[in-house]
Image (cartoon, helix red, strand yellow):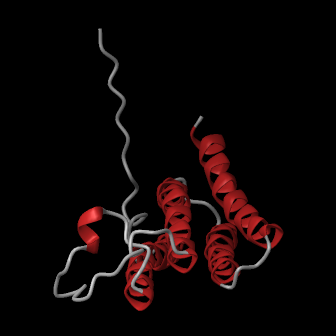
Amino acid sequence: MEAHIVMTVEAGILSLENPVFHTYAVAATIMVLKMMVQPWITVRRMLKVRAGFRSPEDAKKSPINPNPREGQLDANEYVERSRRMNLNDLESIPGFIAAGFFFVLVQPPLLLAQILIWTYVVARAAHFLAYVTAQIHDIRATCWTFSSLAVISMSMYVLVNIV
């Protein structure tokens, strides 16, 4: 005998009329934009310094690379810093998107949602600024910690409310 679990979402939870969902939608959209813009920053840096290209075919003559030169495939710290920032976004932002969505579904108090969601966004913005200005690891780690704790808190709140 199969057990069927039926879950319904209360009407309005996933509506922009719901202030918790609205908060999440704005924050998640900002974070998706951040995640999608960072690779463009990397490309801009590659073109600016004409270095940091990754694949052998990238060093061939083309309209974007009309004058290939020796060393274009060598690592370039200016470009690699942007790549590391992109990888960090890819490690962090999808978890926030998922945890935040489930968090909305359990209908947390608005103030709690705003604190956790905006803590994440502000911490990630601070992390970006710390990384782009080459701050010491301790500063980046502190920013990362606040963003991570916000996502962990949302996830724990979800678990407590659905188990």
**Picture quarter with the N terminus:** top left
In this view, the residue farthest toward the front is 70
Residue 47: which quarter of the image? bottom left
| Residue found 66% across the figure and 50% down from its top | 157
In this view, the residue farthest toward the left is 63
Nearer the observer, 145 or 59: 59
Q: Pinpoint residue 8: horizontal percent, then vertical percent.
A: 36, 46
Q: Pinpoint residue 148: horizontal percent, then vertical percent.
A: 68, 59
| Residue found 62% across the figure and 44% down from its top | 161
Nearer the observer, 59 or 2: 59
Q: Is residue 19 left or right of residue 137?
A: left
Residue 160: which quarter of the image? top right
| Residue found 59% across the figure and 48% down from its top | 158
41 up-or-down from 108: above or below: below
16 up-or-down from 11: above or below: below
Residue 112: which quarter of the image? bottom right
